Image (cartoon, grey):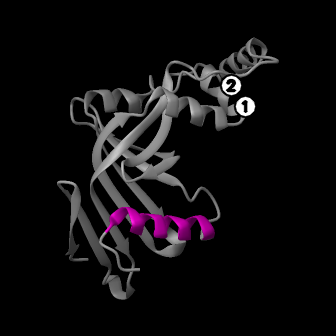
Amino acid sequence: MSTTDPIQLFDTWFAEARASEINDSNAVALATVDGAGQPSVRMVLLKGHGPDGFVFYTNRESRKAGELAAVPRAALLFHWKSLRRQIRIEGGVTQVSDAESDAYFASRSRDSQLGAWASDQSRPLDARATFEARYEEMRARFEGGEVPRPPHWGGYRVTPARIEFWQDRAHRLHERRLFVRDGDGWREGLLYP
């Protein structure tokens, strides 16, 4: 598909990945950097995307959230090995609205909701039993009722400034299309493999 809109191209590639990837086609590597310049990367799940950006959710007291507070920029990398494709996205990061976070949180399984309350994500844990006991406490606390979104949990949106589409080719003669934000539109070019 030839298009000059990287969001449309992402939609096409993402739909193909969702149809062919066995596990977590929405898994994406998220790279951040702390205030001292130390990089960190981990996998998260993409939970929304569109012209305004790419959304994931997490504990806002986690390491990644602290890094995003210090340096509100990030890079994302989708790698779909079976399709021999990857997409790199770089841009600024903002928190999504409370309403958007509430709506997504309400769509999660009850166990995942309870886990968000029980976990001090990224902090040291003395024993798995400690976490399991906290989970059981949350199950008792919210028994018979809805589980509200914890105040320390929500979404982030990466607003793309650069999007690169990489397609594997024989003999490492790969195709790389780069889109760079240019005002309200995009400037497109190619990169050497």
Mark 1: give few (<14), some (14-19) or many (20+) Cα within 10 Å: few
- Residue 10 versus residue 145 in the image, above or below: below
Q: Secondary structure at mark 2?
A: helix
Magenta residues span 5-19
Give yes or no for contact between labels 2 and 1 (Cβ–Cβ under 8 Å): yes
97 up-or-down from 47: above or below: above
Residue found at x 51% / y 22%: 124
Q: Which residue is mark 2?
A: 114
Q: Amino acid at mark 1?
A: Asp
- Residue toward you, 184 or 34: 184
Asked which secondary structure carries label 1, the reply is helix
Q: Position of residue 118 (x, y in %)?
A: 63, 20
Q: Is residue 13 magenta?
A: yes
Residue drawn at 56 percent across, 21 percent down: 125
* Residue behind mark 1: 111
Residue 193 in percent (x, y) is at 26, 77
**Residue 110 visible in the picture:** yes
Q: Is residue 57 left or right of residue 161?
A: right
Q: Inspect the image, locate mark 2, and give the three-letter code of the amino acid beneath it.
A: Leu
Image spot of residue 185 (x, y percent): 23, 60
